[in-house]
Image (cartoon, grey):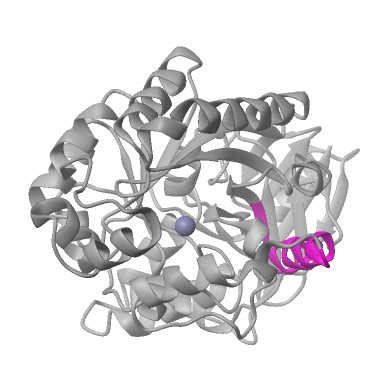
Amino acid sequence: MKILAADYLVTMDETRKIIRNGAVLFEGSQIVDISFDRELARSKYPDAEFEYLGSNSVIMPSLINAHVHLEFSKNKTTLHYGNFIDWLSSVIEKKELTSEIDLVSSMQDALRLMKKSGIGALGAVSSFGKDVEVLASSGMRVTLFNEILGTGEERAEEIKSDFLRRFETSKRYASSMLTPAISLHSTYSSSRRLIDFAASFAKENSLKICTHFMESKAERFWLDKNRGEFKVFFKAYFGVERSVIKADDFLSKLSGLKAIFVHCTHATDAELELIRNDGGFVVHCPVSNRLLGGRLLDVETAKNMGIEYITATDGLSSNYTLNLWNEMRNALFGYADLSLKLLPYDLLKSVTINAAKALGINSGKLEVGQNADLIAFCLPGFVEEDEYLPLQIILHTNKVDKLIINGVEING
Ligand SMILES: [Zn+2]
């Protein structure tokens, strides 16, 4: 058994408990006790290994990046930002982005950075299956969303068999730490046959499913009116004249799956209600949304509707770092009209317990019986009021001193 003690324990549990001078006790892969007094914990478990993490130290659940595309980690300065269609065209045209050259090392660098910043679990969208091996050996808890997409009905069988081949490969790496899942790319990039296939495949195999949903004004126009920038784009690249599906039809095809809808920045209130009523999840990626010329998710409306949103980085094709602290800081400044007493805690929730619920993992809060997935770091000074602790944590943290996943200390 190990006792980790800190000045602040941010439990992220349902009662929002913050414990001063407390300790977390874990044995093997599980949290077995939470103590309100570190000295009492020490005397209660005299044989346990004890470690106090120092002045102004914080222990909290490790972070969860619920939406990332690791295979796009090579992008640094090449893609076009500011408009979704310009960006998408640049992703398609710049083939070197996904070429094999330096791909593995760029993915390893990205994973190393995430671990240093305290990310212990990922929802990774895998487009080509080139990331499976590095993810499986990362020591992180991974939900691997094998992606499926393709607009032409005539190519549906070929696309399905490529997906099934990648899915079978990912199953060979399946373990208590890696769970194969499915990603249906988006509303606009798949034929009806593929949408039906993805939904029934997820259902039959009890898989987690995620999809990009209403990320841009162009997507909204295309699905609602068969107009706008997507019309030009689809004609140029795929010879397609009309959207294959309306948004509500798309949502109804995924109903019953508790799907993860990524972005939703241009979703209507009625669509958000449908997602909520179905037990689905909403992920937003503020940096990506800004860079691709979109807008930020209306998190206050979502929250008032009872949607516990999730914050994630998306891939390096639409971000400059996969550090979730950075993502939270950007959100903090992006939502300039929201309370600095409430928003920071919501953001911490969005990368811990909310993300854990979406991925279906037993992590994201410090509680007896949870996975021992936690991080420790130190703040530069004392924080007097608990209500400002989440804000100070987000302002001052970039990397962590300790990342423990499944009870094992991971060195980035
Ligand atoms: Zn994405």
Residue range corresponding to the magenta coloring: 101-120
Can residue 73 be seen here? The reply is no
Q: Please indicate, yes or no, whether residue 228 appears anywhere in the rendered image.
A: yes
Q: Where is 27 relative to 236, above or below?
A: above
Quarter of the image with the N terminus is top right
* Residue 118 is covered by the magenta coloring: yes
Q: Is residue 70 left or right of residue 29?
A: left
Q: Residue 210 appears at what percent x and percent y?
A: 43, 41
Q: What's the magenta bit mostly, secondary-structure-wise?
A: helix
Left or right: where 75 falls relative to 289: right
**Rendered-image quadrant of the C terminus:** bottom right
Q: Considering only vertical position in the picture, is 312 above or below 48?
A: below
Q: Give the mark count.
A: 0
Relative horizontal placement of residue 269, taking residue 400 as reference (left or right): left
Q: Viewer-proximal residue, 384 or 190?
A: 190
Quarter of the image where one finds residue 245: top left
279 or 407, nearer to the observer: 279
The residue located at (28%, 51%) in the rendering is 240
Is 352 above or below relative to 384? above
Question: Residue 4 in the image: x percent, y percent?
Answer: 76, 53
Residue under the point 37% across and 54% down = 238
Q: Quadrant of residue 137?
A: top right
Residue 138 belongs to magenta span: no
Q: Position of residue 135 (x, y in %)?
A: 75, 47
> In the picture shown, does residue 308 fall above or below 118?
above
Q: Position of residue 145 (x, y in %)?
A: 56, 39
